[in-house]
Image: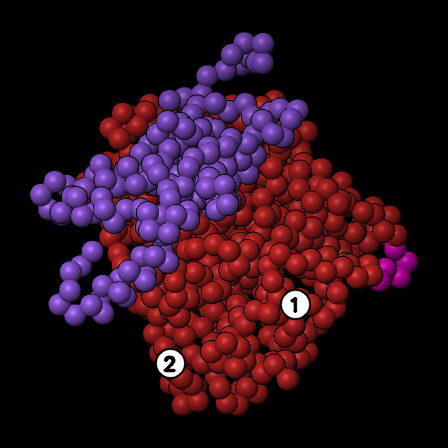
Chain colours: A purple, B red
Amino acid sequence: MTKSYPFEPEEAPPEYRGLPRINPLLCIGCGACTNVCPPNAVIRIDDCSSGTRRIVLDVGRCIRCARCEESCPTGAIRLTREFEAATDDRNDHVEVVEMKLAKCRNCGSFTDYTERQVHKVLSIIPPGILDFERIRDKLPLCSECKRSLTIINASRVGGEWR
Amino acid sequence: MIGEFERTFGAVLEKKTLGKKKVLYALRVRQEDFPKMVRFLLSMPTVRLFTMVGTDERPFEDAFSVTYWFADWREGEILGIRLYVPEDNPEYPSVASFHKGALWFEREVKDLLGLYAKGLPDPRRLILSDDWPEDEFPLREDFEYYSSPLSERKPQYLPKIEGTSVHAIGPYHIALDEPAHFRLFVRGEEIVGVDYRGFYSHRGIEKLARGRMNYNQVCFIAERVCGICGFCHSTAYAQAVEEAAKIEVPDRARYIRTILLEVERLHSHLLWIGVAAHLTGFDTAFMRVWEVREKVMQLAERLTGNRKTYGLVVVGGVRRDLLDYRVSMIEKFLKEIKKEFDRVVDFLLSARSFVERCRGVGVLTKELAREWDANGPVARASGIDYDVRRDFPYAAYPELSFDIPVYTEGDVLARAMVRIDEVRESLSLIEQAIDAMPSGPIMAGFNEIPGGVEGISAVEAPRGENVHYVMTEDSNVIYRWRIKAATYNNLQTAPDMLRGYTIADAPLIIASIDPCYSCTERIQVMDVGRWEPCP
């Protein structure tokens, strides 16, 4: 029964829920995982002055519930079968994915979503249902400009909608 | 119970129906009638105090409320009586003054909400640490969940009984790896009195759930209430929310929950049988029982992705389906476990040293078990025929057949026998559930959870009933969540079980309750070395 672990490798079963990892190529920074994570192990930090968003995953806080995996729209965050989390440096537990926030095309300030989110949205709009070019013109807008443009457009009786 | 109660007292009460056979009465006038009502209910032979909830209802009722929930296990009825307690005069009549089982409930409400039961026999502090200020009440709405005030340390121990000396067990139990401090007052070898100080692992997760979690995140912290019967807690919580929001759980999800609940009972009982063998000095049996348990743990890992903390339940259903290859895996594992368990039990019970060590020790009479509202294997070993699975059916239990072992001796051996019999019943329940497994979805579709609705639900955990009460609020938040674990009542019987026996019996008697301090105190202890929850 006794194994000579850790001198021989120990495999977890295929169903095992182990340490989560983010694939930075797939992550679009939407923050769906940060909304569902019960212990707030993955959080979203926006820096509006430098225009970056960081998705910070701390496996030291993680409870391996796999809610993030369920909610991720691109399959970027996945639970692996790794279970050996011990380390002498706390920073080894933290994984940071940084990406650019989109710039508002009206006022030039940073919006509260990323460039990758814009690409994702544009890529999943079904052709023929919505006017593709008009939506492309509207994106990206920050929430303030969106609100004021909506009011301006709505008050323009009979006028052209942007 | 409900019919008789309404005929006698209906005139002064405001009635609210929560579900089938579940009603809540609000007593707004004539609070002095309340003890009479409780006496009337508890005089019925099959009525027990289920749980008690104190809530800060000042935002909408302009008062605090305390609700006593009673359960009639023959009729399957649940009845709540709610008293409103004004802020300027926070007092209400005590039930503990004539019914022992209410003692910790009322002490807890005093600690957490600052409501005083008039005539409470033991008004010492129960939950909060000794250095918590007297005028800070963590469950009040105006207390932020992240603050932790400090003041002078004032421990409140019971005074020593004349002519005795004090023998301390704890603050760590020798076998169960959890913090609990017993002070035994002994005359020579004999225990004549017991003082208990626990709640060292209280971390206020009810407040945390109120402060920063939504209703689906709470499922996961509920699972971490206990390192052994966590799945029972998350199921009980999810059921309470489902009842409050009137969500119908799909059949397949109910069956999957049942299978996992029984897998959990298997590993918990096997753990306990092993610990009991260890405490009686029979370590060979301890190793062999845990060898069987290891198979159950591996099965759980293959089914859910982890040995413990299955993470399977969310409100409305379950997250992982029971795929075909998993079904055949369960069948294979069950066959092995059954064969080995029979061999190991024969081996254990053939040892006179084990049987004689447990026989006649730690006797809890039926009367005392009733007074303290003992439940689970402790009650069933003392002749109380009560099991939540049969009496308040949930998940798939109404469609499955099983026996409930009841013994009348009330000693440690009877408690061991109840658990051994229950392992066999669990194995048969899992087989039945697999055979009868319906197809279909595993998650219910539902809209937003409405605010201001209440639900109460119980699950038969390996140790007894886990009762969860939930009151919701708008925007997917839980307003009040109350956990009552089985050990909450069972642990209170420990002083009565210990009295008259010797110091050497104490660890075995305490362990025979299968106490789960973390459940009772609502937090999990983690052995970081093994990445596995401690018992």
Image location (x, y in percent) of residue B334: 36, 28
Q: Amino acid at mark 2?
A: Lys
In this view of the protein, which residue sits in the foreground, B328 or B166? Answer: B328
Q: Main secondary structure of the magenta part?
A: loop
Is residue B161 located in the magenta-colored stretch of the structure?
A: yes
Mark 2 = which residue?
B15
Q: Is residue B367 above or below residue A36?
A: below
Q: Secondary structure at mark 2?
A: strand
Residue B137 shows which numbered tag? 1
Residue B189 shows which numbered tag? none
Q: Which residue corresponds to the image point at 87% horizontal and 48% vertical from the top-left?
A: B188
Query: Which residues are drawn in magenta?
Result: B157-164
Residue A135 appears in view: yes
Image location (x, y in percent) of residue B322: 29, 34
Chain under callout 2 = B
Along the horizontal axis of the image, is A12 left or right of B506?
A: left
Label 2 CA crowd tier, 10 Å (few <14, some 14–19, many 20+) = some
Q: Amino acid at mark 1?
A: Phe
Q: Is residue B358 above or below residue B244?
A: above
Image location (x, y in percent) of residue A50: 50, 41
Q: Which residue corresponds to the image point at 53% horizontal and 53% vertical from the top-left?
A: B486
In this view of the protein, which residue sits in the foreground, A139 or B391? Answer: A139
Chain under callout 1 = B
